[in-house]
Image (tube, grey):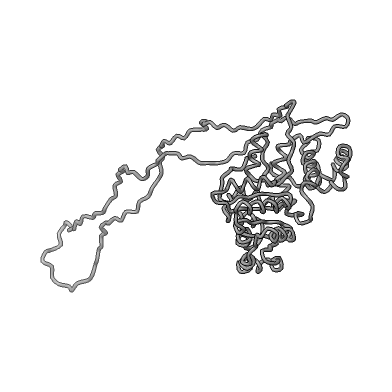
Amino acid sequence: MTMFATTRGSTVVGVFDDREDAHEAIEALKDDGFTADSISILSPDKLATQEIAEDTGTHAGAGAATGAVTGGILGSLGGWLVGIGALAIPGVGPFIAAGAFATALGGAAIGAGVGAIAGALMGMGVPEEHASYYEGEAKAGKTLVTVRAGDRYDDAQSILRDHGADDVESRNSAAQTTGNPVLQTGSSARPTREAEGTLQLREEELVANKQRVETGEVRVGKDIVSEERTLEVPVTRDEVVIERHPVDRRPSDSPIGDRGQSIELPVREERVELEKRTVVYEEVGVGKHELKDTEHVSGTVRREEARVERDGDVNMASADAAGWEQAMLGYRQRWQERYGTSGNRWEDVEPGYQYGFDMRNQSQYRGRAWSDVEPEVRRDWNQHSPTMPWERAKESVREAWENTTER
């Protein structure tokens, strides 16, 4: 899991678990010379935010609500728009924005929905990756305080931190000190575990290597074949025509002799003589080109899986802590979308989700349906987690079991 880059803008953001700490931080900022209109707050509790704004003099300008309505929010959300600077984000819940935050959020929430808070922060100059983190904290029920600090960035950040604020940079610093990855959402801190022994799990993987081989050969030659052909050739010939017709009787000049008289007329015709000459009637060219195709090859591979055996009353922590910290982001986001406005906290249900995730990835349970394994999982839970009744944890465990996330 990667850390956030610590790119700085001109706006300082602080995350407060306790609204009273946010109240005191704003007072300290004002005492240090920061003007009221440079400070903004965002809280999921309308009454608490209004109280802070009234006590400290931070104003939520009327233009925030007006701008939101004219920007189309009222048209798409209807009754979700509540009061001046009040916004109800679908799937998240009602928020009250005060100060510069109200103006930015009013612009970011056009069309409703997911990412409105991050969009507002980005509009105030907060880097995108940081804005997503702070949006997760706000959805988790925490209060955000922002300060347009300009060249007094370090002063504003120091004041917020002195009053208990958390931010992206402080989390990065903590991670570099402890060597633990930074969570992108507001999950509770986890103790550092030092491995006393390491078991490497190995697996075989298929690697495709290609080599060119000769699969055949093409030879092109020529053979002589004979065939009969017929030509139609027009020819001429002489034909003898003998005509006889009577004449007027008249005296002959010569007497009839002993020898007869004859007329010779040559008769001719055209005769066809064949000769052969060689001509080129076609050319055959030989070449080749490559065709691309996909072959599906398969093979049997093996892998090693961890087998965890417990003797006695052993409280076993997650065998795949790094995997859970990655998967937890998806589980938490899904939980916030479904139950974020119920008043419950993610920290209260996270143990059940983590337990379901861990058990599902054990070899004896992998691939089995929830209805099949529930009795075994319930017995294991009751044995190793006596402080939380199974009926309270059951739904969290089941959802983690049935809804896998990318690891």
Q: Quadrant of residue 67?
A: bottom right
In front here: 278 or 40? 40
Q: Give left or right: position of 260 versus 201.
A: left
Q: Residue at x 68, y 62 (%)?
A: 87
Could you tell me which residue is drawn at 61 percent across and 53 percent down?
147
Instruction: Find residue 212 and report its horizontal and vertical position in percent.
Output: 51, 31
**Which residue is more in the foreground, 180 or 124?**
124
Residue 295 can be seen, yes or no = yes
| Image spot of residue 367 (x, y percent) | 78, 40
Left or right, 402 with respect to 269, comes to: right
Tell me which corner region of the image, top left, top right, bottom left or bottom right, holds residue 114.
bottom right
191 or 382: nearer the eye? 191
x then y, percent, for residue 356? 79, 42
Image quarter hosting the N terminus: top right
| Quadrant of the image occupied by residue 34 | bottom right
Q: Is residue 55 above or below residue 177?
A: below
Q: Is residue 89 visible?
A: no
Relative vertical location of residue 281 with respect to residue 307 in this rendering, above or below: below
274 relative position to 307: left or right? left
